[in-house]
Image (cartoon, rainbow, N blue to C red):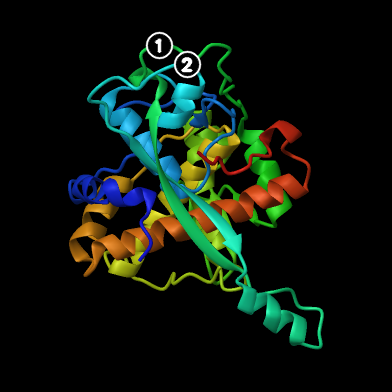
Amino acid sequence: MNKRAIDSIRDQILDQMNQGRAPWQKGWTPSRGVSQPINGKTGRPYKGWANILSLYFNAEQHGYSSPRWVTFKQAKELGLCVRKGEKGTHVEFWKSYSTKKDEQEAAERDDDKKPFKRLASKVYSVFNEDQLDGTIEDAPEAAPVDRGIQFVLDTAEAAGVKLAFGGGNKAYYIPGLDLVRSPNLDQYTSVERAICTLLHEMIHWTGGEVRLNRDQSGEFGSDAYATEELVAEAGAWLLSMELGLPFAPQHTTAYLANWASRTHDAGKALDQALSDAQKAARQLIDAADKAGLTYEGDEQEQAAA
């Protein structure tokens, strides 16, 4: 099994989840404008749920203030050194490739299909700028992207999410009707809360049978129910991180504690749930991109070390 960036923090995440917490939970409501971790030499944002969680989690744990990360080699190329005793944080870079056999088989076929693509990952250790013996000169900036409720509504329309406002005080996704119902926007205590709630329900929507087809049949309190809630909450957080939206976790505590306590192989299930969250977030981000709601500066390549 390939080594993953999340391997070094999985147990810590599961321990927090057993306590009903997760890395994206804070004791306060985040302000508008979100900065993703970036490579301190290239300026490219790190992408992928494992990388974002790994960097975010370690930055929170150690109190790093800089969004910039570099490898040991990149630090030297920038004229800096990693301070003695500092430990790196794992990130992964995925690359597709075809073997000679794959290419030969494709050439022998009488069709237009391209060679079979395989995926391989390589794990790097990166260090936060706060772990270096100086600051990075002319450092790339992780400019916060600040978007609001209208962007969320436009993204929902672009993706084809059916939103129904009013008629109650709860927000939920109805699989049978393929509909997201929400209180009226003026019923929310803040714009941030409205955004967070709608993102959560829109992630549920991506799991519909005609889209990502996740198991959404679990009853309240079941493992399947708790897992889908984990997907929705983590997906909403990843979505907010990439698109620059405020995120204030909602009713996660009971769900996470229940999920962690009921799951037979929690580590494997966590990987699957977070992978599903990434796919869900990506579906909505792609819809926003295709509709022209994001601009060129938001088109981010996966950061390699």
Q: What is the number of the mark on residue 253?
A: none
Res 262 → quadrant: bottom left
Spot occupied by residue 104 in the image (x, y as percentages of width and height): 69, 80
Counting labels gives 2
Decide: few, some or many residues near mark 1? Use Cα within 10 Å; few <14, some 14-19, many ≥20: some
Task: Give the amino acid type for the residue marked by disc 1 in the picture.
Answer: Gly
Is residue 36 shown above or below 234? above
Residue 46 seen from this side: yes
- Looking at the rendered structure, the secondary structure element under dot 2 is loop
Is residue 56 shown above or below 17? above
- Residue plotted at (59% across, 29% down): 42
- Looking at the rendered structure, the secondary structure element under dot 1 is loop
Question: Closest to the observer: 246 or 50?
Answer: 50
Decide: few, some or many residues near mark 2? Use Cα within 10 Å; few <14, some 14-19, many ≥20: few
Spot occupied by residue 114 in the image (x, y as percentages of width and height): 74, 74
Return the residue at label 1: 134
Describe residue 8's horizontal placement relative to residue 171 as left or right. Answer: left
Describe residue 273's horizontal placement relative to residue 106 as left or right. Answer: left
Q: Are marks 1 and 2 in contact (CB under 8 Å)?
A: yes
Res 69 → quadrant: top left
Residue 226 seen from this side: no
Task: Give the amino acid type for the residue marked by disc 2 in the picture.
Answer: Gly
Describe residue 50's horizontal placement relative to residue 34 as left or right. Answer: left
Return the residue at label 2: 79
- Residue plotted at (34% across, 22% down): 82
Q: Nearer the viewer, mark 1 or mark 2?
A: 2
Question: Distance of mark 1 from mark 2, alpha carbons?
Answer: 9 Å
Question: Closest to the observer: 289 or 3?
Answer: 3
Spot occupied by residue 26 in the image (x, y as percentages of width and height): 32, 31
